[in-house]
Structure formats: structure tokens, C-alpha cells
Image (cartoon, rainbow, N blue to C red):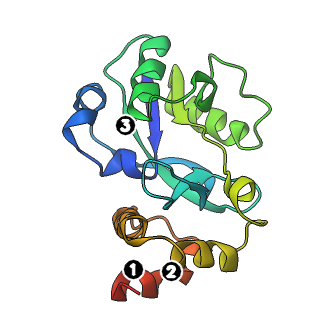
């Protein structure tokens, strides 16, 4: 399977708003069986009203086998740019790839090993860092729950949507702690 894989574990898999159509047109169907990465709801999203979003979090994450798709692009730089624009546009250094210096990331080896086993030319992923600590006290499940409970009505609705729509394969301590919030709207 030569080609470029794009890794996904959050809204890439479910958010199909029209503004994301250019990215989706370059991305094949999502498949299970990507590498195992440490995920947690530990990034505070400005565009989602303060909701916590899933990121690779080497310190607090739960190992999770993520999904992937094969990009229609044949050049890494084009696949990187597709994902960068889809994610914000975000800073270029927050889009991971083998073509860029990401070897220092603690989870890089897992991605490289998986890519080699799949015969891929490159893998592209969202490398946004967790940032909970920058906005709140140190990250913990209790602090994450308190953050969500303190959101305004808009932020609370967006947090609920993100938690509900996160793929079923994502099972983290924060998601477990917030099940009542999601199911009962409280």
C-alpha cells in the first residue's frame, strides 16, 4: 500500500461541514487499524467554545489505535497543506510528517513502525499539543471535568457534541468521567 496516510481520531472522522469539503475530497474512506497513540481530551479549543478536544498527549493519554485514510495526494507537501488548512489553518509545525523533524516526539516511533509495516511513503497527522495546563491548573481528570462544567451555554453544547461524536474507539479517563455530562446534558 504505497501512498500517504492521514491519521485521525477526532473531528476529522465526523465533522463534514461544507468548509471541510476540500480536505474530504482528498481523503479516502477512514479505516481502523492505524498506529496506537496516547490520546486524551486535553486541548482547549477556541473555535469550539472552550470544549476539550482530542490530541496526542504523551503525558496523560490512553493508548488508542487510531483511524487512517489514504490521501489522494502523491506529494507529502500537498497532503500536509490539505490537513493544515482543514485544521484551522493551523501553524505548519503542528502538522506531523516523516518529511519534517518530528523524531523527537515520544510517539514518533509507533507511527514510523506502523507506516513501515503498511508500506507507506509518508504519514501525516495533527500534532497540536495539549494546552490545558496553559489555561487552567495542571491537567487531571477532575480539572478537565470542572473546566467542562464551567463552560457557558454555547461552549457546553459544543463540548457535548464533540464528546458524543468522538469515535467509539476513543476510551479515555476524561471521556469516562464525562459520560453523565454527555448523556444527561448536565
Q: Seen in the image, is 119 located left or right of residue 28?
A: right
The residue located at (53%, 22%) in the rendering is 122
Give the quarter of the image for residue 21: top left
Write down the residue under mark 2: 178
Between disc 1 and disc 3, the foreground one is 1
Vertical comparison of 139 with 88: above or below: below
The residue located at (80%, 32%) in the rendering is 104
Are there few (<14), some (14-19), or many (20+) residues within 10 Å of tag 1?
Answer: some
Tags 1 and 2 touching, CB below 8 Å: yes
Are there few (<14), some (14-19), or many (20+) residues within 10 Å of tag 3?
Answer: many
**Location of the N terminus (image quadrant):** top left
- Residue 136 is situated, as x and y percent measured from the top left of the image, at 71, 63
Residue that lies at the very extreme toward the left in this rendered image: 18
* Mark 2 secondary-structure assignment: loop
Looking at the picture, tell me which residue is in the foreground, 82 or 150: 150
Vertical comparison of 180 with 117: above or below: below
Are there few (<14), some (14-19), or many (20+) residues within 10 Å of tag 2?
Answer: some
Q: Which mark is residue 87?
A: none
Q: Seen in the image, is 127 located left or right of residue 133?
A: left
**Location of the C terminus (image quadrant):** bottom left
Write down the residue under mark 1: 182
Q: Which mark is residue 69?
A: 3
* Mark 3 secondary-structure assignment: strand
The residue located at (57%, 26%) in the rendering is 91
First along the sequence among labels 2 and 3: 3
**Measured Cα–Cα span from mark 1 to mark 2:** 6 Å
Give the quarter of the image for residue 17: top left
- Residue 58 is situated, as x and y percent measured from the top left of the image, at 73, 53
- Residue 40 is situated, as x and y percent measured from the top left of the image, at 60, 61
Amino acid at each position: 500500500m504505497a501512498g500517504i496516510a492521514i491519521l485521525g481520531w477526532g473531528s476529522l472522522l465526523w465533522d463534514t461541514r461544507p468548509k471541510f469539503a476540500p480536505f474530504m475530497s482528498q481523503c479516502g474512506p477512514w479505516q481502523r487499524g492505524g498506529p496506537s497513540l496516547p490520546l486524551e481530551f486535553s486541548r482547549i479549543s477556541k473555535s469550539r467554545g472552550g470544549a476539550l478536544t482530542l490530541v496526542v498527549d504523551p503525558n496523560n493519554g490512553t493508548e488508542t489505535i487510531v483511524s487512517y485514510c489514504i490521501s489522494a495526494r502523491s506529494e507529502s507537501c500537498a497532503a500536509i497543506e490539505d490537513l493544515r488548512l482543514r485544521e484551522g489553518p493551523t501553524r505548519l509545525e503542528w502538522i506531523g510528517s516523516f518529511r519534517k523533524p518530528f523524531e523527537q516526539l515520544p510517539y514518533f516511533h509507533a507511527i514510523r513502525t506502523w507506516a513501515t509495516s503498511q508500506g507507506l511513503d509518508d504519514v501525516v497527522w495533527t500534532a497540536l499539543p495539549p494546552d490545558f495546563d496553559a489555561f487552567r491548573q495542571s491537567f487531571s481528570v477532575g480539572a478537565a471535568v470542572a473546566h467542562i462544567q464551567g463552560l457557558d451555554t454555547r461552549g457546553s453544547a459544543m463540548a457535548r457534541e464533540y464528546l458524543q461524536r468522538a469515535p467509539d474507539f476513543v476510551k479515555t479517563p476524561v471521556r469516562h468521567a464525562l459520560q453523565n455530562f454527555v448523556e444527561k446534558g448536565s
